[in-house]
């Protein structure tokens, strides 16, 4: 009987060990960070590679920078939970800015569409003759004598005037 009690005790310990091996992996600590990812495109839905992406923590002003890859994607892994501002910049395109809140174990996806930047055009005109003379108050125009004589006025026939 002693052998039976030892076997039953061993069986109980073995069953407990098997049960613990199933439960213990579930008890591993969970990650306490989140992540931010997304894709950057322009107005025509084309991908934007090599755009500079900046993620700034609103509470600490700590910044992380990344660049989009050839498929226009960016990733910030292991982001501490909190409020953030996201800024995306690329040459020839307007800046994209957004505010977001990252939660524990959240994978926030922020897909951005950048608009074409308006070009500032400066037109400078030099050496142009003014259309209106502003230094004299009179108006004048010269008519030649032949032209004046050909005008159908001043005592000439009414039929010529019509």
Image (cartoon, rainbow, N blue to C red):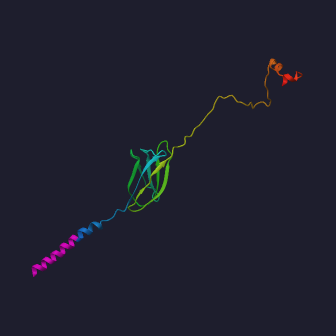
Range of magenta residues: 1-18
- Quadrant in which the N terminus appears: bottom left
Position of residue 149 relative to residue 61, above or below, is above
- Quadrant in which the C terminus appears: top right
Residue at left 13%, top 76%? 7
Would you say 24 lies left or right of 78 here? Answer: left
Residue at left 48%, top 44%? 44
Q: Position of residue 112 (x, y in %)?
A: 46, 50
Main secondary structure of the magenta stretch: helix
The one of 159 and 16 positioned closer to us in this rendering = 159
Would you say 126 lies left or right of 113 here? Answer: right
Residue 153 visible: no
Quadrant for residue 29, please give it: bottom left
Would you say 122 lies left or right of 79 here? Answer: right
Position of residue 9 relative to residue 57, above or below, is below
Position of residue 13 relative to residue 124, above or below, is below
Residue 149 visible: yes
């Amino acid at each position: 009987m002693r052998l039976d009690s030892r076997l039953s005790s061993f069986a109980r310990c073995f069953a407990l060990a098997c049960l613990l091996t199933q439960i213990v992996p579930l008890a591993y600590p969970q990650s306490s960070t989140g992540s931010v990812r997304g894709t950057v495109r322009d107005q025509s839905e084309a991908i934007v590679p090599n755009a500079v992406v900046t993620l700034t923590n609103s509470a600490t002003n700590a910044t992380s920078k990344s660049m989009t890859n050839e498929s226009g994607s960016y990733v910030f892994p292991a982001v501490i939970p909190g409020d953030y501002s996201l800024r995306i910049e690329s040459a020839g395109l307007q800046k994209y800015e957004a505010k977001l809140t990252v939660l524990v174990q959240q994978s926030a996806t922020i897909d951005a569409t950048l608009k074409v930047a308006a070009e500032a055009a400066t037109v400078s005109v030099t050496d142009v003759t003014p259309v209106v003379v502003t230094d004299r108050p009179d108006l004048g125009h010269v008519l030649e004598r032949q032209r004046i004589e050909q005008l159908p006025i001043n005592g000439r026939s009414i039929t010529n005037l019509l």
